Amino acid sequence: MDSTMMVWLAVLLVFGLAAPGHCDGNQTDVKTSTQAPAPKATTQAPEPQTTLSPEQECARLNSSCSDCVGNSKCMYCYTDNKCMLYPSGKILPPSSMCDLDKARWGTCVVNFKALIISMSVIGGVILLTITGCCIYCCCCRGKSSKKYEREDAKYESQRMERKAKQEERRNERRSRLDEIRMKYGLTKSDDYQRTY
């Protein structure tokens, strides 16, 4: 992907594509007619079409900024109100060609200085977000897993304490039952025979 295409995509992503005629406020009314156009009385031989070079194409679109930036190969310079060929080998047009705050490409609304600032801010925000996510994943998740291990150990010790207390109570009940049996002269074997 060449640099010109990357700048074009950035302009589209950040500011959207401006429709021709919306930049300078010159909108033409389109009138529709129900009548068919009258046929021409004279027939002329078709003129041979010549292919214009990109420089000539851009020079032909000098009428307004919106006409000029409608062609992706052209850029409009407000310094001398000229439509010129965008330098395809460079990311930004050189200042000898046109000042960055006076040059428009892709849309008449945003100049190159604003585009550079907005792209660097967006890039910085993305970088900070990625860095923050990496820091969170590396540092905080390690601490939280240690926290869960401590909680698990705490719950395990509480469970063992409850089990020990339960066993102690069970032994106390058995000893009381044994005392009662001895007091009334009952043995464990007698108790078994009575129930079955």
Image (spheres, helix red, strand yellow):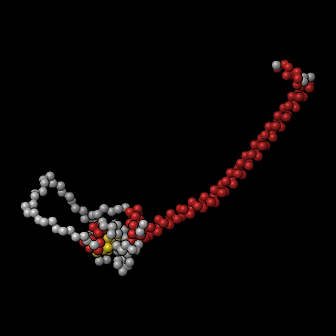
The front one of 20 and 61 is 61
Residue 195 rendering spot, x and y as whole percentages: 82, 20
- Which residue in the rendered view is the most extreme toward the left? 41
Residue 167's image quarter?
top right
Vertical comparison of 3 with 29: above or below: below
193 above or below 9? Answer: above
In the rendered image, the quadrant that contains the N terminus is: bottom left
Quadrant where the C terminus lies?
Answer: top right
Residue 97 left/right relative to 144: left
Q: Judge from the rendering whether residue 21 lies leftward or rightward of residue 113; answer left or right.
A: left
Left or right relative to 95: residue 60: left
Confirm whether residue 83 shows in the render: no
Q: Residue at position x 72%, y 52% from top?
A: 150
- Marker count (numbered): 0
* Residue 96 visible in this rendered orientation of the protein: yes
Viewer-proximal residue among 164 and 20: 20
Q: Nearer the viewer, residue 90 or 31?
A: 90
Q: Residue at x 69, y 54 (%)?
A: 146
Which image quarter: residue 136?
bottom right
Residue at screen point 47% across, 65% down: 122
User: How far across and down, in percent of the image, does residue 173 sit?
Assistant: 84, 32
The location of residue 44, given as percent across then percent down, is 11, 65
What is the quadrant of residue 79 in the picture? bottom left
Residue occupying the point 50% across, 63% down: 126
Q: Position of residue 71 (x, y in %)?
A: 30, 67
Q: Is residue 122 left or right of residue 80?
A: right
